[in-house]
Amino acid sequence: MSLTLDIFSARAGKRVEPGELVEVDIDLVLANDITVPLSIPEFNKIGVKKVFDPRRIVLVNDHFVPNKDILSAEQAAMARRFAREQGLPYFFDVGTMGVEHALLPEQGFISPGMIMVGADSHTCTYGALGAFSTGVGSTDAAVAMATGRMWFRIPPSIQVRFEGKAKPWVGGKDFILYALSRLGVDGARYASLEFAGEAISALSMEGRLTMCNMAVELGAKNGIVAEDDVTRAYLAGRTRRPGVEPRVAWPPRTQTSSSVAVGQSKAKAADDGSYAAVHVYDASKIEPMVARPHLPSNGAAAADLSGTRIDQVVIGSCTNGRLEDLQVAARILTGRKVHPDVRCIIIPATPTIYRQAMEQGLIEAFMEAGAAVSTPTCGPCLGGYMGVLAAGERCVATTNRNFVGRMGHRTSEVYLAGPAVAAASAILGRVATPEEVA
């Protein structure tokens, strides 16, 4: 079976099929300073006094924190009050909070085989660790917090395989932008998007997290990667939070080879028919990618956009704010200067990443280059603060969405890219490839 069918079958105690409705226990529920204020009134309507298990609720104030304005301060205060009233041990605020989808894996909340939901669309990130995770609405999150259970319609599975060896500077962000350019923003609508192949096996956990983070941009219900040695190495030594391990053990899976030709797609390609489609791409032919405005699927090779002048670069977010991303950016920015017409904003995704970046000299390198370094926050990704765009301005960002007005004025433009392209663009003042400066 596909990985998602494996997980739900183990939880349901029977083999489940795509399209089937099941109600299962939830291992973890996540909400943030934007979504939990909407969940709290719905939680109160249910008539329960306490959440089903305080150890299985994680609240992270990360979108507008440190407080951007009075409204954001009120939202964050609601989350704080709810956490105190419910006795939630896993509440992260200023000083401890990071961007939620970087923070939870880092802090050991996620294990293979889990079923978790979050009141944020990019909760699909955690599939990189072999978990089923998906975003839900604030009302659904309230029900999950109250009951510890939720119903799902089992999604069909689509496997996307990247075979071959990636070129220098090409990583998970380039893979997912390439897949988006081929399949479109509805290419995996309500499907479980399973990433596999030689290039995925060689990909770091940071790169896998990036890819699963953007599975939702293809319309997917979730993204997922099979547990392997990379997964186990990442999990080794990380804090296992009491009470948040999977309630049903999930045996490790190994990725199998495919007979589908590279560059082709084939419906019902799996031997047992558990995949609705398999798409196979040659990783060795993928260049550093950029998604042009105003869709993540509007992809092109960065080299083809070299005449595009920019005003700002943002390196961070739940997609590319991890240590590996900062290391890549530092390799390019060290000893060079940000273009005088460009504002370069770098946002480590968690306090731990910030500290590691300081210890490795990355923060100093960024500041010497003329970049601004922020405390962890979602900030400019959703047009919140710390880098909102004016009318007509262009930004290269390592974020996950570039919709109209996403980062500021409706006439501004966002070009999505990985940290290598973003850092190179900051230096040259236009969309650039890392080969041009490194």
Image (tube, rainbow, N blue to C red):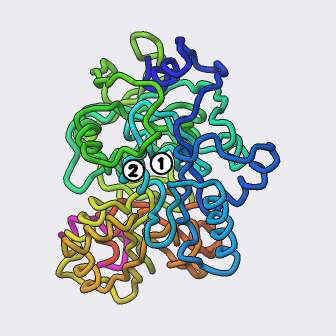
Give the percent coordinates (x, y) of residue 351: 37, 68
Mark 1 and mark 2 in contact (Cβ < 8 Å)?
yes
Q: Which residue is mark 1?
A: 214
Give the percent coordinates (x, y) of residue 190: 60, 33
Q: Report if residue 430 lies within the magenta region.
A: yes
Which stretch appears magenta?
Answer: 427-438
Give the percent coordinates (x, y) of residue 157: 50, 26
Quadrant assignment for the N terminus: top left
Q: Report if residue 281 lies within the magenta region.
A: no
Image mark for residue 284: none
Q: Is residue 373 left or right of residue 20?
A: left
Tally the marks. Answer: 2
CA gap between label 2 and label 1 equals 7 Å
Establish if 279 lies above or below 424.
above
Q: Residue at x 64, y 44 (%)?
A: 136
Establish if 124 lies above or below 224.
below
Q: Which residue is mark 2?
A: 210
Please state which amino acid type lies under the numbered disc 1: Met
Q: Which one is in front, 53 or 202?
A: 53
Circle 2 — which element?
A: helix
Q: Which one is in front, 69 or 223?
A: 69
